[in-house]
Image (cartoon, rainbow, N blue to C red):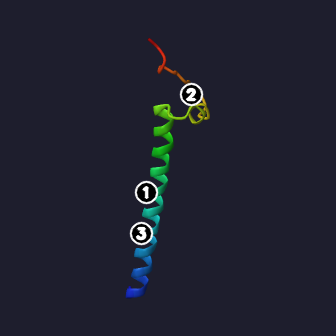
Amino acid sequence: MNQSHRSRVNDACNASVFALVIALAALLYVFGAAMSGDTVGLTQSIRGAEVFDTRNLP
């Protein structure tokens, strides 16, 4: 395997790993925001989600 072919394979692997990290970070952000209740609209947009607002309870 010559050097230019190996370089292209490494570049493709690096790009795919970078894309995977970005996708996982986005999923973590969305589900983290939904579970923490930061945005009620986001939580309600998830099918089957129930919103319990406990901020004003005694």
Residue at image position (42%, 69%) is 13
Q: Which amino acid lies under the numbered mark 2 shown in the image of this protein? A: Ala
Q: Which amino acid lies under the numbered mark 1 shown in the image of this protein? A: Val
Could you give the CA–CA distance between mark 2 and mark 1, rounded to whole angstroms? 26 Å
Residue at image position (47%, 45%) is 29
* Residue 36 percent coordinates (x, y): 46, 32
Residue denoted by label 3 = 14
The quadrant where residue 42 appears: top right
Quick check: 56 left or right of 10?
A: right
The quadrant where residue 2 appears: bottom left
Residue denoted by label 1 = 21
* Residue 49 percent coordinates (x, y): 56, 28
Q: Which amino acid lies under the numbered mark 3 shown in the image of this protein? A: Asn
Residue at image position (47%, 33%) is 35
Quick check: 14 left or right of 51?
A: left
Disc 2, SS: loop
Residue denoted by label 2 = 49
How many residues crowd mark 1 within 10 Å: few (<14), some (14–19), many (20+)? few
Between discs 2 and 1, the one toward the N terminus: 1
Could you give the CA–CA distance between mark 3 and mark 2, rounded to whole angstroms? 36 Å
Disc 1, SS: helix
Mark 1 and mark 3 in contact? Answer it, CB < 8 Å.
no
